[in-house]
């Protein structure tokens, strides 16, 4: 069993958004990965940028392999490539660790954040959701995660799936609402920046109170006059009008 | 015409969220209102707290009356109470200034932000959307607004209505998405705080790029496997399932 004092040897697999941000995060705290496994041009560039040993096959000895690959590439075919004694973890929110079909030593290391190659983030407060089959593997992942984050959490598969689903609502769907605001304003020649203070305040407020208590607006007040005006304003945006009606109804149904 | 050097004499009408935050904002920069017009206990407390002259009738002389009252209280009945020479402004996003039915000297002073009695905000970056019937009245409102904000903008009625509608999407509906995340996590015993870094990053990212370019997630990728899993996970939340389907479809329709 790995002691917390020993240096953990680990490799990152991939060269996309998650791989890029993880290499950067570990390098930023002086703990760059021992290897980067990639066969793409992006991988070569990433390895060069952070001066990480680039490998093309999983033929080295490490404690942990962090698979930063597309969800549908996480499967038994991939799982069998890695040496038997090592801990092989994927980094996906909605994939079970069992799909790698290894007899033991699989795990999950899922950073709950929207990661882009082009935008650096402060990893120190990003929740890293870990799962593994043994307590010693969990401790190993806790040690690895705590190198870059103060918020490493043990989540079971069901909890992690739910966290990923919740993330779709609070990030992807929220971004779509931003996009609607952007489009509506653009049609009236108003700059999107006018919404920035409101957007940031709304995000903060959900945690100042909680999102049940911070719900405001015409639907929460049951203000049918404004709701009708808004629905009329959206006549030429049928997708947006449908979303307006559905969420307003849901808010009205849930009033308390 | 009011020169920008003269002190603007103004009164705030009301004692709710908007009145409270405006009194606080003007007081914070040493420019408290000359009068607070209110007949409620809240009004008495607000006037006491900020040491503002409380009045019960609009029987004083000021340059501007700022009506911080409910949308449906903004009407001709209210408009006729105020002295003829003064500029009477409401602070609502979706109400025309004409509904006050005064022959002249009406306007709008709409701070585009979610305001609560209990939560102080930094007014300096809040967009204040102004409208009036003459250039001199617009200048007067610009002078008043710039006492508390660096972002006073002239918006016509249509632009302001659109900004308010956009605000419903990016604040009220976004908050509802937060609430869905909260509810889903709570059912799995995961603390809502796990979403905080993601929520703040999503809000920032919309302005780092723009919300069209920052759209990510299963629907943007066209990942039907994950979408189907999520729809199944939402079986016992029909309202949330409908919202998931509708927004995912809209995102898929708008992919580029």
Image: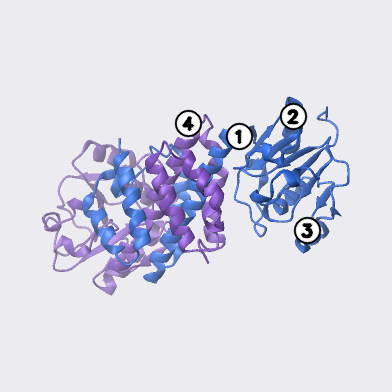
Chain colours: A blue, B purple
Q: CA distance from mark 1 to mark 2?
A: 17 Å
For disc 2, the chain is A
Q: Answer whether labels 4 and 3 touch (C-beta < 8 Å).
A: no
Residues flagged by tags 4 and 3 on a common chain = no
Asked whether residue A197 appears in the rendered view, the answer is no
Q: Is residue B253 above or below residue A204?
A: below
Direction bottom: furthest residue:
B135
Query: Badge 1, how many Cα within 10 Å: few under 14, some, many 20+?
Result: some
Q: CA distance from mark 4 to mark 2?
A: 27 Å
Direction top: furthest residue:
A135
Asked whether residue B174 appears in the rendered view, the answer is yes
Q: Which mark is residue A43?
A: 3
Secondary structure beneath dot 2 equals helix
Check disc 2 and report the residue beneath it.
A139
Q: Answer whether labels 1 and 2 touch (C-beta < 8 Å).
A: no
Check disc 1 and report the residue beneath it.
A157
The answer to which of marks 3 and 2 sits earlier in the sequence is: 3
Instruction: Decide which of A77, A177 is in the foreground and name it.
Output: A77
Q: Is residue A159 above or below residue B60?
A: above
Image location (x, y in percent) of residue B45: 28, 37
Q: CA distance from mark 3 to mark 1?
A: 30 Å
Q: Answer whether labels 4 and 2 touch (C-beta < 8 Å).
A: no
Residue found at x 67% / y 45%: A123
Mark nearer the viewer, 3 or 1:
1
Q: Is residue B51 above or below residue B136?
A: above
Image location (x, y in percent) of residue B203: 51, 53
Check disc 4 and report the residue beneath it.
B187
For disc 4, the chain is B
A7 to the left or right of B36: right
Instruction: Decide which of A71, B177 is in the foreground and name it.
Output: A71
For disc 3, the chain is A
């Amino acid at each position: 069993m790995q002691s917390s004092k020993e240096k953990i040897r680990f490799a990152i697999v991939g060269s996309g958004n998650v791989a890029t941000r993880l290499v950067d995060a570990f390098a930023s705290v002086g703990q760059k990965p021992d290897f980067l496994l990639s066969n793409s041009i992006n991988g070569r560039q990433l390895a060069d940028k952070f001066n990480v040993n680039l490998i093309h096959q999983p033929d080295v000895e490490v404690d942990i392999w962090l698979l930063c690959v597309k969800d549908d590439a996480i499967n038994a075919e991939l799982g069998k490539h890695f040496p038997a004694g090592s801990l092989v973890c994927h980094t996906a929110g909605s994939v079970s660790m069992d799909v790698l079909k290894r007899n033991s030593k699989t795990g999950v290391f899922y950073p709950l954040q929207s990661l882009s190659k082009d935008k650096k983030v402060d990893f120190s407060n990003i929740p890293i959701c870990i799962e593994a089959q043994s307590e010693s593997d969990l401790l190993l992942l806790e040690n690895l995660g705590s190198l870059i984050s103060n918020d490493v959490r043990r989540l079971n598969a069901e909890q992690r799936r739910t966290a990923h689903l919740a993330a779709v609502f609070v990030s992807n769907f929220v971004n779509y609402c931003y996009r609607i605001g952007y489009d509506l304003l653009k049609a009236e020649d108003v700059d999107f920046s006018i919404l920035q203070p409101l957007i940031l305040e709304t995000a903060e407020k959900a945690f100042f109170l909680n999102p049940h208590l911070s719900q405001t607006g015409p639907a929460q007040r049951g203000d049918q006059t404004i709701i009708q005006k808004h629905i009329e304003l959206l006549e030429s945006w049928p997708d947006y009008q449908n979303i307006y009606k559905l969420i307003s109804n849901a808010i009205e149904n849930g009033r308390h």
